[in-house]
Amino acid sequence: MAITGKVAKIVDETTVVITVGAKDGVKDGMRFVIVTEGGEVKDPDTGESLGNWEVVKGRLVAAHVQEKMTVCVAELPKSEEGSGTRTLSAAMIEVSMPGRLTGKLNVLPGEASGSPEVGPVRVGDRVRSVE
C-alpha cells in the first residue's frame, strides 16, 4: 500500500522534507513522487470519468528517515546515474516530465491535449511512495 504525505519543507533544489516517517513505514532508500492533478480523464467509449490524471512534478529518494518526517533528495534520471554528462535542459525535462525523452508515439495531432502546466515544487504538494 502506498504511503502518502506532503512536502513540509524545501531545503534547496535537491532536498525536501516530507510529512511521513518511520511511524508510517518509510525506510531509507524508499522512492516517492511529488504529484499534482492534471485534470479529469474520461473513458472514450462510455464517457465515464476515470478520475483525475496524476502528474509527476518530481521524484525523490528517502535519505534520512525520522519518526514523523523524512529528508528526501531528488532522484537522478536513469540516464544520469553514474555516467557522463548531459545537458541541463534535458535533465530538467526528464525530472519534470519523466519519460518525455524516451521516444515519440505516432499520434493524431488533433487528439493531443498537451501537457498540463505543473509549476514548481511547493510546500504542501502531495507525495506518495512508489514501487
Image (cartoon, helix red, strand yellow):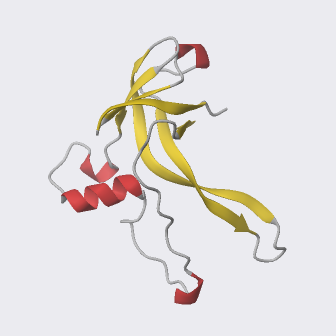
Percent of width and height locating residue 79: 28, 53
Q: Residue at x 41, y 45 (%)?
A: 121
Q: Residue at x 41, y 37 (%)?
A: 60
Left or right: residue 93 compared with residue 47: left
Q: Residue at x 49, y 68 (%)?
A: 115
Q: Residue furthest left?
A: 85
Q: Residue furthest top?
A: 67
Left or right: residue 14 compared with residue 6: left
Q: Is residue 26 visible?
A: yes
Front-most of residues 27 and 15: 15
The image shows residue 58, relative to residue 21, as above or below, that is below
The image shows residue 23, relative to residue 33, as above or below, that is above
Percent of width and height locating residue 94: 35, 57
Front-most of residues 86 and 4: 4
Q: Residue at x 75, y 76 (%)?
A: 44
The image shows residue 55, relative to residue 10, as above or below, that is below
Front-most of residues 25 and 122: 122
Q: Residue furthest front?
A: 123
The image shows residue 22, relative to residue 58, as above or below, that is above
Percent of width and height locating residue 39: 63, 62
Quadrant of the rendering where the N terminus is positioned: top right
Q: Is residue 28 visible?
A: no
Query: Which picture quadrant has residue 111?
Result: bottom right
Quadrant of the rendering where the C terminus is positioned: top right
Query: Which picture quadrant has residue 87?
Result: bottom left
